[in-house]
Image (tube, rainbow, N blue to C red):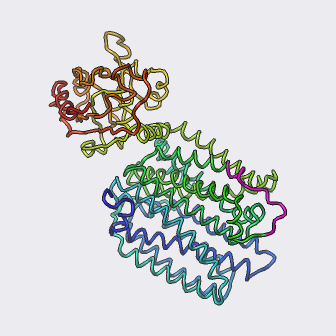
Amino acid sequence: MADGGVFSLLGKRRFLPYFLTQAFGAFNDNLFKQGILLLFTYVIATADSASLINMASGLFILPFFLFSPLAGQIADKIEKAKLIQWIKMAEIVLMIMAAAAFVIQSKEFLLVLLFLMGAQSSMFGPVKYSILPQHLESKELLAGNALVEMGTFLAILFGTIIAGVLFVMPGGINIICVGIVVVAVIGYLSSRYIPDAPSSNPDLKLNFNPFIETLETIRNIKDNRAVLLSIMAISWFWFLGASYLTQFNLFTKEYLMGDPAVATSLLTLFSVGIAIGSLFCSKLSEGQVELGLVPIGSLGLTIFGVDLFFATPDLGGISERGVMEFLSDSRSYGVLIDLLLIGIFGGFYIVPLYALIQERSDEKRRAQVIALNNVMNAIFMVVSAAAAIFMLSLLKLSIPQYFLVLAVMNGVVAIYIYHQVPEFVLRFCIWMLGHTMYRVSKSGMENIPQEGAAVLVCNHVSYVDALLIGGAVKRPVRFVMDRNISQMKGMAWFFKLAKTIPITSEKRDPEVYRKAFESIDEALANGELVCIFPEGRLTKDGEIDRFRKGVELIVERNPVPVIPMALRGLWGSYFSHKDKPALAKLPSRFWSKVELVVDASVRPQEVSAEALEDRVKALRGAFA
C-alpha cells in the first residue's frame, strides 16, 4: 500500500480476482435489467408498460428482503471462495435462460428470471463484503472498500449505458443475449482465482425464516451502536441515491430541457463523482478506517444538494437540447458541478461506513450483519419510491424542490446519527486538526495491540496531545486528564464527547480521584486502551517533568501492558506554553510536522514510573 497506493491492491491475487468478479456481476445485473426495461418500454409496448416496468423493479428488489438473511448465514457457515463460485455458476445458468427469454420476448419468463437474478445478487451481497477482512490486512481494508465502491458504481453505469447503446443497434437484442452470457462466464472464471476464505462459523444452524433471522441479527448488534447506526446511515445513502437516480430522466427533460443523452451524461457524472470520492477517501484516510470523513461527506451532500435547487436554471421557452448544446450553455455548469460534488462527497460518506461494519462486526456473524445491511438498504430504497410519490404527486413539489427537501433531510439524519454516535464528530475534529495545523507522522504503531486492554503513557506538551494521539491510534482511546484541562472553556464539550476521565490529586478532591480510578478500572476491564500523561500537567519549559506514581497504582490494580510513547515537534505550537501561556498568543505555525513515536510494551510486573520516564525521554530525544 505504501509503495503503490490504493491501486496496488489490483496487483494482488488476494484482491484482483474478487474485484473483477464483483465488478462483472454488477455490470451484468444492470445490462440484463436495463435490457428488460428497454424491451418492455419500446418493443413489448402495451398499455401496461409502466406497470411492467414498476413490477420489474420490484421483483429485482424483493429477493433482498426474502433471501439476504439466509445468504448471510450461509456466508458465515461455509468457505466463501467456493460459495462465490457456486453463485457465479448459477449466474451462467440464469443468463442462458435469460438469453432465450429475450429471443422469444416472453415478458412472463423475463420477470421470473429477473426475480431469480435478484435472488442470485442477494446471495452474493453478504459474501461480497464479509470476505474482504479475511483477505486484506487491517490497513488495506478502507482502500479495498474504496476500490469495490468505485468498481461497483462504474460497473452499474457502464452496464446501464451499454444496454442502451446496444439496444438501438440492428440486432442489438441478440448482442445483449450473447453479452450477458459471456460476462457471466468471465465472472465465473475470475471467481476461480479467489483464494480460500475459511468458514468463520461452521457450526451455525441455519434459520430459514427471514423475518426472525433479521430480528435476531438486530438483537445481536443492538449494543454495538456504531455498527447499527452505520447500517442506518448506509441505508439512508441508498435512499438518497435512489431518489436522485429515479428522477434524473424527468429532471433532465423538464427542467434542463435535455434529451436522453444529456440524462445519461448526468448519470455518468454522478457515478464518476462517487468513484472519485471513494478513491480520495482512501487516500485521505492514510490506511485506516477514518470515521472523520463521514461528517465531511454528509456536510457536502447537504450543501451541494441545497445548491442544486438554486443552480437549476429557468429555461422556459427552450426546446429539447442535445449534449453539446447543453454543455455550451453556461447556465448548466452549476448543475454539473453540484452533481459531481454530490457524488464525490457521497464516496467520502459511504466508504468508511462499510469498512467500519466489516472491522467492528463479530467475525462469526459478519456476513449476517452485512445481510442485515442489505435488507435495510432495500427497505430504504422502497421507501424512497413511496416518498417520491408522496412529495411529487400529493404535495405537488417540483423535482428541484424535492431535491432541496432531500438535502435538508440529509442534514437532519446526520445530526441524529452523530448525536447518537459521537465518535464520528470526535474523529472529524481530530482529522481536521491533523490536516490543518499539523502533519502527524507515526512510527512504532505496531506496538499498540489491535485488541485487549493496555495503558499508554506519553509526555504532555500541549492541550491537543490527546487529539493527536487519538487521531494516530486506530483504536478508540480513553484519556485520563487533569480536571482543570478537561473543564477548559471552549474545549470542555470536546473532552466530554471523547469520554475523557478527569482526575486530580487525592488531597485536592478525594471523590474525583476515586471516581477516576473506578473509571480506569472499568475501561481496562472492558479491554479498552487508556492513555495517561504521568507528568500530570503541561510542560512549561519543553522538558519532560517527573512521572508521578499514579501509573504504578493503575497497573497494580489492573495488570495490563504499558506502552511508552513520545510526542515530538509540539513545543512552540499555539497550544503549548512556550513563551506565553497556551492559547494566549496568535497561531504562528500551520501544517507543522509532529511525530508520535511508540515503543515496545512493558510487562505489568516491570512497570515503574522512573523507568517509564526514562523510556519516554529516550523516545522523545532532543525534539520537544
Which percent across, then down, holds residue 556? 22, 26
The residues colored magenta run: 307-319
Residue drawn 57% across the image and 74% down it: 159
Which percent across, then down, holds residue 609? 19, 24
Q: Quadrant of residue 7?
A: bottom left
**Quick one: quadrant of the C terminus?**
top left
Name the residue at the top extreme. 507
Name the residue at the right extreme. 317
Q: Nearer the viewer, residue 89 or 342?
A: 342
Is residue 324 left or right of 391 when viewed as pictured? left
Identify whether 93 is placed above or below 505: below
**Quick one: quadrant of the N terminus?**
bottom left
Q: Quadrant of residue 186?
A: bottom left
Majority secondary structure in the magenta region: loop
Q: Nearer the viewer, residue 183 or 249?
A: 249
Residue drawn 48% across the image and 54% down it: 351
Which percent across, then down, holds residue 63? 58, 66
Residue 501 counted in the magenta span: no
Residue drawn 64% across the image and 59% down it: 336
Q: Quadrant of residue 334?
A: bottom right
Is residue 249 left or right of 1 when viewed as pictured? right
Q: Is residue 382 visible?
A: no
Residue 310 counted in the magenta span: yes
Q: Is residue 40 visible?
A: yes
Which percent across, then down, holds residue 208? 51, 62
User: How many numbered tags mark residues here?
Assistant: 0
